[in-house]
Amino acid sequence: MPHNYKNSTLAGYALLTGLFISGSIQAAGFDIWLYPLDYNEAEQQWHLGEAKAVTERDGYDNQPSFSPDGQNLLFTSDRVDSQNDIYQYRLDNASLSQLTFTPDQSEYSPQAYATAGNGVQIKYVVEQGVPHQSVWQQSANTPRQRAINSLIPAGYFASDERLGTLIWARYAYSLYFEPVGETADERHFVVDNVGRSIHAIPNDKAFSYLHKQLDGDRIIKRYSPLDNSHQRLIALPPSANEDYTWSQDNWLFNIDGGDLVGWKADQMTQPEWQLVSSISPPSADHLSPSRIAISPDNKHLAVVWQRK
C-alpha cells in the first residue's frame, strides 16, 4: 500500500524549496518530459520510470494532453516565429508534427476526443486578440470550427460531448457551463475564484475544478451540470502545485514539492493524498514542475518543467 503522504509532505517540499525560482533567476521557458508509469495491483502501488525529454530547448513547450489511444501527446509550442501553435509528439517513434498553422493567432490548451466514426477531433483555445479568445475544434484535413457558441473569453475549458463545455473565463477566474446546443451567458454562471485546472471526470457525467478559498485552502470539487450540484473531493496540500490530473481509473494526481502524490477518488474512506514517487528535476537546467497529464492507458505521465 502507498503510505500516508501527510507525514512526508514537508520533507519532500524542503528538498525542492531551494530550486524554486527566486527574483534573481529568469525562466528560459518550459519543457515537457515523459515518464513511464505502471500500477501494480498486487502491491496497490504506482511505479514511476526514468524520464525522457519530449522537448528540451529555450522556449515555450507546455499544456500537454494525450490522444484517446494514448499514442500521441499534444502540446502548445512557440518554436516557429515565437507564435504558439499546436504540435503532436508520437510516443512510438518520437516524431513531431505541427497541427495548426496560424501566423496571426495563437492556439493553447489542446485536447483530443474520439468521434462517433472512430476518428479523432482536437479542441483548443484560439487567441484572436484581447479579449477575443474562444474554443475551436478541427478534424483531420478539415477547416476548424467554433466548439462553443458563447463569446465569453475562454482561457481554459473542459468538454464532455454528452453534456457540454465548462468554460474558465479569462480575467474573471470564474466558470460558466455551456450545455450542448445552447449559448453560455451570465445565466450559465457556475462558480468564481477558480484555478485554471478544470477537467471532465472519467467515468462520470461531471467535471472537477479547483476552488480557491478565502482562508487560502484550495479544494478540488466535483460539479454536476445535471443537477447543478457541487461536492468537495479533496484539498490540495498547502505547498502543492495547482495543476492536477485524472487517470482513467479515477485517481487524482498532483505534484507537491519533490513528490508525485495520488488520491483514489472512489475510496472516500482514505482522506489523504498518498505518496506515489519522488520526482526531481530531470536535469540541471530545470527548476520546478507545473502541468501534468496521464495517458488513458495509465502507462505514461507527462510533466512540464520550467527551465532556468
Image: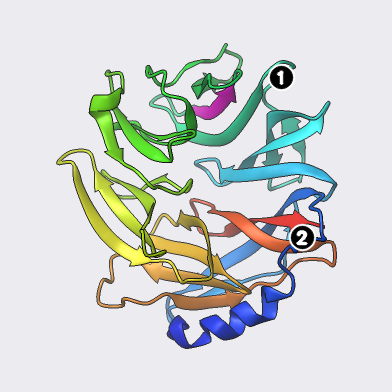
In magenta, the rendered stretch is: 120-127
Taking the spot 82% from the left edge, 66% from the top edge, the residue there is: 283
Q: Does 253 sit left or right of 200 as displayed?
A: right
Q: Could you tell me which secondary element the residue under label 1 belongs to? A: loop
Magenta highlight on residue 68: no
| 74 vs 26, nearest the viewer | 26
Q: Quadrant of the C terminus?
A: bottom right
- What x and y, as percent, mark residue 274? 45, 77
Q: Main secondary structure of the magenta part?
A: strand
Q: Quadrant of residue 125?
A: top right
Taking the spot 42% from the left edge, 46% from the top edge, the residue there is: 198
| 13 vs 95, nearest the viewer | 13
- What x and y, as percent, mark residue 200? 37, 44
- Amino acid, disc 1: Phe
Q: Could you tell me which secondary element the residue under label 2 belongs to? A: loop
Residue 245 is tagged as none
Q: Is residue 168 among what the camera can see?
A: yes
| 38 vs 262, nearest the viewer | 262
The residue carrying mark 2 is: 23
Check the image and report above or below for 126 versus 276: above
Name of the residue lying farthest toward the top:
143
